[in-house]
Image (tube, grey):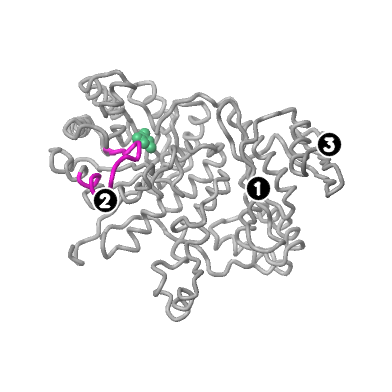
Amino acid sequence: MSPKTKKERVYIFDTTLRDGEQSPGASMNPEEKIQLAKRLESLGVDIIEAGFPITSDGDFESVKQIAGVIKKSQIAALARANQLDIDRAWEAIAEAAKPMIHVFLSSSDIHLKYQLRKTRNDVLKSACDMVKHAAAYPAKIEFSPMDATRTDRDYLCDIVEAVIDAGATTVNIPDTVGYAIPVEFGELIAYLFDKVKNINKAVISVHCHNDLGLAVANSLAAVQNGARQVECTINGIGERAGNAAMEEIVMALDTRKDFFNYYTDIKTKNIYQTSRLLTQITGIAVQPNKAIVGANAFAHESGIHQDGMIKERTTYEIMKPESVGISESHIILGKHSGRHAINEHYKKMGYNLKEQELNRIYVRFKELADLKKEVFDEDLEAILFEEILRVTDKYKLIYLNIVSGSVAVPTATLQMEIDGVLFQDAGFGVGPVDATFSAIRKITKTDYHLMKYAVNAITGGTDAQGEVTVQLQFNGRSVVGHGADPDVLVASAKAYINALNRLECIKGNTEEIVVE
Ligand code: KIV
Ligand code: ZN
């Protein structure tokens, strides 16, 4: 490739709110989805797939609200290839500044035989009819032949050509089950460019799952062979092993622009905060060694590496942490920091607070700074999340008192507010956490199966805030609750109560439509 070649744009289609939400325990409530959508917009995402409106009234409403507030990014709504789904998808995004209807239908023989029980001709016809139906709306139309990588290549070419003729403006090639290998997937995209006559009339997109850990590599191979849109999620969350991670694709294209010669419109400095927001919302932690956004992604442990870094950072560093928004100095000196300093620091982290939000946050900040010597970015995020971003809750913790020790029977006395009314009770258990959860169950008269309980220190030191994750199960679905506090028992109570509040949000919202 000549260095003089003009760089070409790769469009970023983010499906964190749709495919990402299909990660076990990742369900988000409407307010959280709007927060995340706004963040994705400021990150510079070209298309935000906001949801799958036919699946439930809750999903429909979230997509509609997102369509109402997001102006710069296109808003996509997913639909199966039938009129009801498509009409409902359109209804949800009709107010969007830039609407897109995303229609999908399986195309592999294995799906046709066992799932759809239809012939190739039936599927080809439905795909065209439904793309035509969708194209009657004033929206961009994307079509996805699901399980494309296990579809007969020539039949796939026929479908791609036919849907473009029918009005598809983008054709997405999904590796639905994460089966492809990079060279092979690149060849498939090249094959389509070679055989499909009208291919230049549409944007070719790819959507890769990570079952073999190859989603990012497959997406990049597709870009090298002509794809100009990549579907991905923040932190790579998604069905099963997840989707291609946006931050990895974007940073690979950016860091190795000498090799790829493509660009995206992503403001890379906003990557880390977006990743953190998603973790705060879903409670799904990023593994420490995760590329780009993991806690160790820029940590140098070995003496030889540290020595090299001191002499010249490029000896062992291919990207600067600041380029993805990880600031070098995370410390705010607690007690003495004023409101202005806190506000400025939030701005640097990407949050613009309103006057009364700052007032509420400042009270919490002072309380924390009295307990801890140093307050870190992560602490500020936790406060922001609890005070501002979290939904209006049905259940609230008022206070928690624990008696525990090597000779005492662990006992928790708890007061809660439920829909504005105060309730108090005590619970016993094998340990203080067990006793706390037992008291909460008594007060709320609930008894959901506890699938997971995990504690993590947000920052270092024994005065660090404990960040607790609780996963509860309801009717085969699971929700994750999240709580932070310098006292891990209070954090545990907050996390359990947060999970209960999140369960309330999804209760009337349980229709199961499975899409990979
Ligand atoms: O993985 C998949 O095939 C999907 C489609 C709906 C694009 O998510
Ligand atoms: Zn998918």
Q: Which residue is mark 1?
A: 468
Mark 3 touching mark 1, by CB under 8 A?
A: no
Dot 2 or dot 1: first in sequence order is 2
* Structural distance between the alpha carbons of marks 3 and 1: 21 Å
From where the camera sits, is residue 512 visible?
yes
Quadrant of the image occupied by residue 497: top right
Quadrant of the image occupied by residue 343: bottom right
Q: Residue furthest front?
A: 407
Left or right of residue 47, residue 478 in this image: right
From where the camera sits, is residue 100 visible?
no
Q: How many marks?
A: 3
Q: Residue furthest bottom?
A: 311
Q: Which residue is mark 2?
A: 221
- SS label for mark 2: helix
Placement of 125 over or under 291, stated as above or below: above
Q: Which residue is mark 3?
A: 426
* Structural distance between the alpha carbons of marks 2 and 1: 39 Å
Name the residue at 59% across, 36% down: 479
Left or right of residue 281, residue 15 in this image: left
Amino acid type, callout 1 = Val
Residue interval drawn in magenta: 171-187
Q: Quadrant of ligand 2?
A: top left
- SS label for mark 3: strand
Amino acid type, callout 3 = Ala
The image position of residue 480, as x and y in percent, is 60, 39
Name the residue at 34% across, 43% down: 208
Placement of 487 over or under 399, stated as above or below: below
User: Observer-nearest residue: 218 or 276?
Assistant: 218
Dot 3 or dot 2: first in sequence order is 2
Q: Residues within 10 Å of mark 3 (few under 14, many from 20)?
A: many
